[in-house]
Image: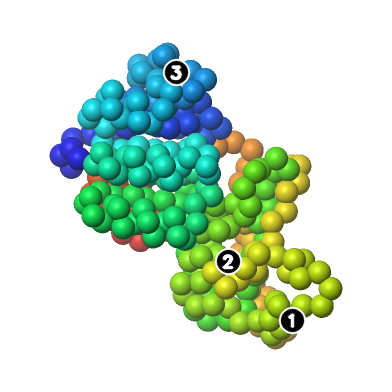
């Protein structure tokens, strides 16, 4: 890893994707970050904002040789491999791709610790989403009943979303929610109660008009609290939080999960 006093040199994987295409010019325009290279199979061999574009993370990191931070906005089936490849090379990682499980994060945390490198992962790098998650974590300390509803576009391939999975797993670290009737005792179609993640039931809707919305509903007798975050139609809200993480990760050792956790450290 480079000096903490030098502008971090950044490689963006998924550079021409939905989030990457907004993130690349933002990194290039930042005075305290350097866009060193990018990864995009569709644009490999080209140049984006002065940075060379490669077809794979391995090729990019090996060709550049001096990257400090990999930002990954690719897909659920390759993000773990990309993260481990970067860590083995001493490169910090900002994980914006969804689909990783708690077990995946345990492995990533172990490798990051052993290599003395940082990883900052969040199911959603929106600042307002981080604030919603922080509020939910506080609520879980005082209200023992909750379930999560995950809304996303009709074509989103993974379920639940990374935002909803992260929320469920982190709420489960506070405590597991109480169920008046265990799921296994459900009459009729048990699957209608959703997936159990972090001890909570998570229900994924995939419909047109949604981008990503995540709602956690807390309840006590005769009262309810809903905490919901709705993402708009652009990737703009994810830029500020991702850049914040890219600036912070060279100073991190091990795994930091959740943008809200990082914000509490600032």
Q: Quadrant of the N terminus?
A: top left
Residue beneath the point at 71% across and 78% down:
184
Position of residue 171 measured from the top left corner of the image (x, y, whole percent): 51, 69
Judged left or right of residue 42, residue 53 is left
Q: Which mark is residue 31?
A: none
Position of residue 209 measured from the top left corner of the image (x, y, whole percent): 74, 42
Rendering quarter of residue 60: top left
Can residue 22 be seen by looking at this rendering?
no
Report the colour scheme: rainbow
Residue beneath the point at 47% across and 75% down:
174
Q: Earlier in the sequence, mark 1 or mark 2?
A: 1
Name the outermost residue toward the top. Answer: 46
Other-residue count near label 2 (Cα within 10 Å), few / some / many at <14 / 14–19 / ≥20: many
Question: Residue tagged by mark 1?
Answer: 185
Rendering quarter of residue 31: top left
Secondary structure under badge 2? strand
Question: Residue tagged by mark 3?
Answer: 44
Question: Residue tagged by mark 2?
Answer: 197
Q: Quadrant of the C terminus?
A: bottom left
Disc 2 to disc 3: CB gap under 8 Å: no
Residue beneath the point at 49% across and 23% down:
41
Q: CA distance from mark 1 to mark 2?
A: 17 Å
Q: Earlier in the sequence, mark 2 or mark 3?
A: 3
Position of residue 152 measured from the top left corner of the image (x, y, whole percent): 67, 48
Residue beneath the point at 76% across and 46% down:
207
């Amino acid at each position: 890893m480079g000096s903490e006093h030098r502008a971090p040199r950044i490689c963006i994987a998924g550079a021409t994707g939905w989030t990457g295409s907004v993130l690349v010019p933002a990194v290039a325009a930042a005075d305290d970050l350097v866009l060193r290279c990018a990864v995009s199979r569709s644009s490999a061999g080209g140049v984006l904002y002065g940075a060379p574009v490669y077809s794979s993370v391995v090729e990019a990191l090996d060709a550049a040789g001096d990257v400090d931070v990999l930002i990954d906005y690719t897909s659920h089936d390759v993000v773990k491999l990309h993260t481990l490849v970067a860590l083995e090379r001493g490169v910090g990682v900002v994980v914006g791709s969804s689909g990783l499980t708690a077990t995946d994060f345990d492995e990533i945390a172990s490798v990051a610790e052993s290599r003395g490198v940082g990883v900052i992962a969040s199911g959603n790098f929106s600042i307002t989403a981080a604030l919603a998650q922080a509020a939910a974590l506080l609520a879980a300390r005082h209200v023992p009943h909750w379930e999560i509803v995950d809304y996303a576009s009709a074509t989103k391939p993974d379920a639940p979303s990374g935002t909803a999975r992260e929320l469920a797993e982190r709420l489960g670290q506070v405590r597991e929610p109480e169920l008046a009737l265990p799921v296994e005792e459900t009459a009729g179609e048990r699957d209608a109660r959703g997936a159990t993640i972090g001890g909570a039931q998570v229900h994924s809707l995939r419909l047109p008009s949604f981008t990503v919305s995540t709602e956690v509903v807390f309840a006590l007798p005769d009262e309810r609290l809903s905490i919901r975050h709705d993402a708009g139609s652009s990737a703009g809200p994810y830029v500020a939080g991702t850049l914040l993480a890219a600036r912070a990760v060279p100073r991190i050792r091990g795994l930091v999960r959740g943008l809200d956790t990082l914000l509490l450290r600032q």
